[in-house]
Image (cartoon, coloured by chain):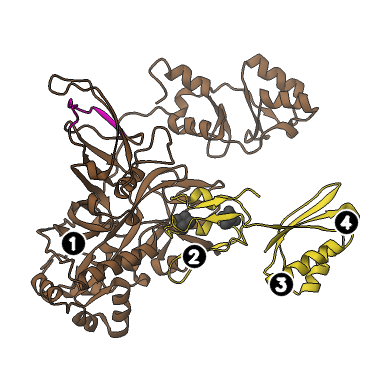
Amino acid sequence: MRFKLTFPKELADKPVFSEAILRFHRPFNIIEADVDAEKGVIVASTDLPEDDVMELVKFFEERGVRVELLAKLLEVDLEKCISCGACVSLCPVEAISIARDWSVVFDEEKCVACGLCVNACPVRALKLSIH
Amino acid sequence: MNSGRGIETMRSYEEINKKIKHGDVVVLTADEYARLAEDKGWEKASKEVDIVTTGTFGAMCSSGAFLNFGHTEPPMKMYRCWLNDVPAYKGLAAVDAYIGATAMSETRPFEYGGGHVIEDLVAGREVELRAEAYGTDCYPRRYLETSITIYDLNQAILVNPRNAYQRYNAATNSTDRVLYTYMGTLLPYYGNVTFSGSGVLSPLYKDLYLETIGIGTRIFLGGGIGYIIGEGTQHNPGAAMSTIMVKGDLKKMNPRYLRGASIYRYGTTMYVGLGIAIPLINERVAKTAALKDEEIYTDIVDYGVPSRSRPSVRRVSYAELKTGRVVINDRTVRVSPLSSVKLAMEIAYTLKKWIENGIFYLSRPIELLPLDTVFKPLEVRRREPRVFEVMRRDIPTIRSDEDLRNTARILIERGIDHLPVVDDRGRLIGIVTSWDLARALAYGKMRLEDIMTRHVITATPYEPIHSVVAKMERYNISGLPVVDEENRVLGLVTADDISRRYVVRGGIP
Ligand code: SF4
Ligand code: SF4
């Protein structure tokens, strides 16, 4: 699951993100982070079970952090994909891999939307949705 | 290897075809047979197995189809023609054409090409046909625009001059920029490796000395039946890079195994599915058919070197490539196959089922392919103009502590746009242009060091002019300092100098 957190500047010196890690006992993967004078933004992902997602949202909102759940960024047209593998070695976060039966499989949750695989696909089976 | 090539000491084609007819033929795919041979030894394994099926599904640029459209009323001798805006070769009779896989659409280049036209035809989709003619007494029509499907065509025959490389190089990239090649996208600093070919399933590698693969061999081609019609172009058996020329009836093929493709910033091509059934006719064939991925080697070649003789970075087995990771210079990098191993396995399996079900019989080649052809390069005989012939030698250079006012004065007085910045031994450390000075003025920068470009694209005196023109286009620059091996500035070559010299003579070489 991927989510975007927006921290108001009052929270700049509070370790809210670390608290969340301790509270949920899960690794969080930070995909993007950006801070300016007004706010801080973190895009992160975690493999939290469905049921706990609402807990997580509540946890952040109670502390004044805005939470947005993000949809998948990468769209794969499996009808078109020929499992050639051209995309596999390009992915910087290893969201694409080859399964035992030589099918190419995608972990859309991991994708950071760099776009390298989209251009490299010879049969145009990949698309990034604008989020 | 030549004595008794093609000899049928273990079993003959007649015996095998009789078994196919009776339904008791034993067929394994090449990976199954390699595993069996590993367990039992190839001698034992080959006693039990009659046929080994192979497959490959990769981009094969030397592919295309002959089409015959039939005659219109009034008839036309088509001189030029396009299918979905992709030009087809018309140097043939009135309504015959050849559509090649790499020909690109004139309206959607790099996205849609001849391979896509072939896929669309095989899928039964409508294709726009446009043709022009000069008109003759026997063929008065001069223009045609209509739509066709494969069912309208008299013949649609896939004829691929070069398919199924026995094995192929793997690719990597040593440079500092991303390269877009026919071997796919190659990340900088050896960032990844790509390879082609199906290794243990490779049709021509499994019959390494081409004893059963020759003119007249019946094969799986594009989901239908095809035949080998000779050696392929660039056939190079000495380097284990043999190729075959094949043909088959497009009307009986399947779009699953013929796919139009576009390789980013390279062009269009077609993925072709091809499989060969190898009868284990003698011990040499039985032995090479048992070769495993661990025993099939290729070179990882540096595509960062823009030359036809690219250096090998290291040797690697298909087994290692297929693990998805290889080590280059102590670093583990990820690997992309470019041909689909999954589809290759599917093809080998399909061919196996065809044989078991008695719908595919083997044919003895009427002639074997040569083993002594070599692959020669093309030497350029015409003299190519080089940088030293057009470069300016008497150009000023400056040191990085020069003040901006002086720098501007030099540019104006000498009437130039590019000024190389050098260290105390005359070695290039940067370049400054009139544009950089304008920027300095706009943003109030005061020192040359702050505005000069440090990563300078350079030329060498013996470099051909066309290579410099390519650099100017790629980096969007108009001038390059010319340097020697020690990076000392010898002169400057600019777009102006090149065009002044060549425009009169009919364009840039
Ligand atoms: S867009 Fe980039 S990050 Fe996402 S799957 Fe493709 S290569 Fe990986
Ligand atoms: S490059 Fe395209 S066709 Fe090839 S495996 Fe990736 S998504 Fe599939």
Tell me, yes or no, whether the highlighted magenta stretch contains residue B297.
no
* Residue B77 coordinates in the image, percent (x, y): 19, 27
In the image shown, does B371 or A85 lie closer to the viewer?
Answer: A85
Q: Which residue is mark 2?
A: B326
Is B321 placed left or right of B240 in the picture? right
In the image shown, does B286 or B136 lie closer to the viewer?
Answer: B136
Q: Which residue is mark 1?
A: B213
Picture quarter with the N terminus of chain B: bottom left
Q: Which residue is mark 3?
A: A51
Label 4: chain letter: A
What span is colored magenta in the figure?
B71-82
Please tell me which of labels 3 and 4 falls first in the chain.
4
State the SS at label 4.
loop
Look at the numbered discs 4 and 1 and tell me whether their residues touch, using CB distance below 8 Å.
Answer: no
Q: Same chain for labels 2 and 3? Say yes or no.
A: no
Q: Nearer the viewer, mark 3 or mark 4?
A: 3
In the image shown, does B292 or B359 lie closer to the viewer?
Answer: B359
Residue B227 position by quadrant: bottom left
Q: CA distance from mark 3 to mark 4?
A: 29 Å
Question: Mark on residue A12?
Answer: 4
Is A62 placed left or right of B360 in the picture? right
Q: What residue type is disc 2 on?
A: Val
Q: Same chain for labels 1 and 2? Say yes or no.
A: yes
